[in-house]
Amino acid sequence: MTRPLARRFTLSLTATVAALTLVLASGCAVTRGQESVGAYVDDTAITTAVKARYVDNREVDASSISVETLNGTVMLSGFAKNSTERAMAESLAMKVGGVKSVKNEITVRP
C-alpha cells in the first residue's frame, strides 16, 4: 500500500471502531423522548464520518471542532483560525450522506 492509501485505510478503520465502541458502550438504551436505537446508530455514523473528513482535510483542524448529530442535523462548535476554515468545516459536513442540515456555531478566533 502506498502511504496515503494506508493512512486513509487506517483512518477509516479507526472511525469504524470508534463508532462501534460508542454504540456498544451506550448499551443501546433508549428512553421515552429520545431517538430510536436505529436513529442513534445513524447519527453516530454521521458524526464519525464528519470527523473523519476533518482529519483527512488539511484546511480544517479536527481537534478544534466538536461535532454532534441528532436526527440528521449536525451541530458544529469550537474554534476556527479563520472564516475559510469555518466555511470548509460546514461544507465538508454537508457532503456526508444522511446529513439533513448543519448548524454552524464555530467561532472564528480573532
Image (tube, grey):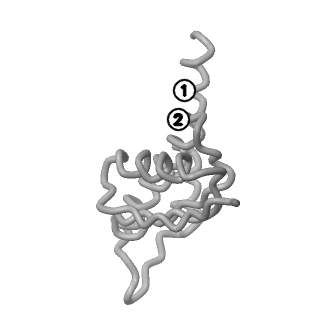
The residue singled out by tag 2 in the image is 12
Quadrant containing the C terminus in the rendered view: bottom right
Disc tally is 2
Q: Nearer the viewer, residue 97 or 12?
A: 97
The x and y percentages for residue 28 are 47, 70
Residue at figure coordinates x 56%, y 63% from the top left: 106
The x and y percentages for residue 10 are 60, 29
The x and y percentages for residue 36 are 35, 74
Residue at figure coordinates x 55%, y 43% from the top left: 54
When asked about the image quadrant of residue 64, the answer is bottom right
Quadrant containing the N terminus in the rendered view: top right
Query: Going by the picture, which residue comes out furthest to the top?
Result: 2
The residue singled out by tag 1 in the image is 9
Q: Secondary structure at mark 1?
A: helix
When asked about the image quadrant of residue 79, the answer is bottom right
CB under 8 Å between discs 1 and 2: yes
